[in-house]
Amino acid sequence: MCPYRIPDPEKAETGGEDAFFVCETAGGGALGVADGVGSYAAFGLNAKMFADELMGGCQQAATIALTDTATPTSSGADDGGASAGVNAEAAGAYLSEIAQLAPAQVARRLLQYGYSCTRSIGASTALTAHLDRASGRLGVANLGDSGMIVLRRHEKGRMTVLLRTKEQQHEWKMPFQLARSPDESNRDALEKDMKELVRQLREGKRLGVVPDKPEDAQLYTVALREGDLLILGTDGVFDNLFDDELCGIADLTLSPSESLVLNDPSLATPARSVAAAIAEAARHRSMDPHCKTPFAKTARQNNTHHTGGKLDDVTTHRPTPSSGAGGGETVAVKEGTCRPREAYLQEIQRVDLPPEEIALRILQYGYIYVHPCLWLITALVVVYLDKKGETLAVANLGDSKMILLRRQKNQRMTVPHHQRAAALLELPVPTL
C-alpha cells in the first residue's frame, strides 16, 4: 500500500487538510483517508489537526486489534507522536470483540475508536477499510465525500468498476462529517483568541458543519481476488476524475499477480507509480478552467454554474490484493521494480519474436518517457514492417486508427485491412 498526497498550494504551509493511515498485517490489514473540513480555518484553526487525530486513533485501533505489535505501519497523520504510544489497556475493552466482527463492521469500529481519540476542535470526512485475508473480503466504512473504487480487469484487458462508494451529503457541498466543537469547559479559555468562533457557537450556529456519528457511516463489503485494484482517495480525486478516466490509468498497470502470469515479476507496476499518476492527473485536471469534471457536472445538477476542475488537496491509496488464501493479502509493491528500458530493447532483437510483439515492445519503450498525466491526451500507434518486408504489425493504444489501402487492377484503392483501437488487448499492456 502506498499513499500519495498533494496539498492545495494555498494550504501547503500546513501540509493541506488530508490525513491517512496504513496498517499492514499477515492477516490482511487496514487503511483509511480523512479530509479535514476547512470551515474552521477562518477562525485561526488548523483544519488538519482533527483529521490527523482521527486517523492516528484509527491506526492505534488497527495496531491493537489486528497485529501483535504496538508499532504502526505507516501514517500520514501528524499527530505529534500520539500514535506511537498505544494505550492497549484503555482500548482493550472497546476492541475486545473485533475479531468476531465482519470486515465492514471492523472498519466502522476502527472509525469509532479513532473518533474517540480526537480532541482538537474541527471536523473531517473519513473512510476506513479492512481487508480480511481468510475470507478474501474487503469491508469499508465511508462517512462523507471521500471515496473508494475497486477495479477488476476484464477478460479483454480493460479495467472495469467492481464497486464504488457513494457520497453522503446532507445537501450539496455539505457532506457527512465527524466534528468536535468547544464545550462549556473550554469555551472561556478559547474566547480570548477566538472570540468570533465562540460567539457563533454560543448562538448555536453550525459554521457549515453538521456533526455526524461514526455509526452513520455507510458500510460496504466486496469479495476480492488477485489482481483487483483498490483506490482510496479524498474528494480532490473524485471531484476531478471520472470513473472511466481512473480505469484508463489502471489499464496501463500490471498487478504483481499479473506479472507472475507473464513469468516476470519486474513487470509489476509500483504502487507509488499508480498512486502518483492518479494524484497528479487529478491535480492537473483541477487547475484546468475549461475541462469537464464530476464536480462541474454535480454543480449543474444543483443549479450552480461551475466550469473546469476543483482545486483541493489530493490524497490517494493504491493497495492491491495478491496471492494468498482467498487472494486477500495486502502488499506494498517495492520501489525500483519498474522494468528497465534495456529489457524492451533486448527483446526486440530476439529472432523468434513475432512482428506484433516487436511493435508492442516499441510502444512500451516509448511509453516509459511519457509523463503520468499525459494519458489524458495521448493515443499511440506503432507500425512495424519486418525485415523481409512481408509482414506488417500494428500496436494500437487509445482511439487512434490505421487504415491499409491496396491499389487494385482498376487503379482504385480498397481496404483489405482496417486496424481499430485495442487490437492487441490480449497482450501485455505498457507499464507506468
Image: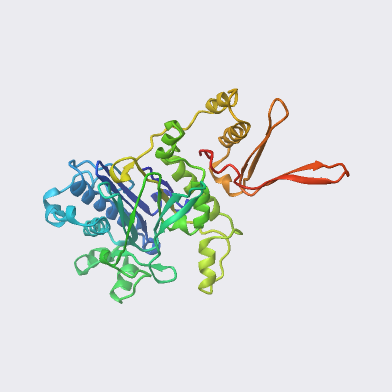
In this orientation, does residue 225 appear? yes
Image coordinates of residue 191 in percent, x first then y, are 28, 66
Image coordinates of residue 270 in percent, x first then y, are 43, 38
Q: Is residue 381 above or below residue 119?
A: above
Q: Is residue 399 above or below residue 235?
A: above
Q: Nearer the viewer, residue 77 or 240?
A: 240
Residue lying furthest bottom in this view? Answer: 203
Colouring used for the render: rainbow
* 389 lies left or right of 222: right
Residue shown at 46% from the left, 52% from the top: 8
Q: Nearer the viewer, residue 389 or 1?
A: 389
- Which quarter of the rendered picture does the N terminus lie within? top left
Count of picture labels: 0
In this orientation, does residue 336 appear? no
Q: Nearer the viewer, residue 243 or 374?
A: 243
Q: Is residue 156 above or below residue 308?
A: above
Residue shown at 42% from the left, 32% from the top: 265
* Quadrant hosting residue 405: top right
Q: Nearer the viewer, residue 343 or 166?
A: 343
Image coordinates of residue 233 in percent, x first then y, are 41, 53
Residue lying furthest front in this view? Answer: 409
Q: Is residue 363 above or below residue 217?
A: above
Image coordinates of residue 310 in percent, x first then y, are 51, 59
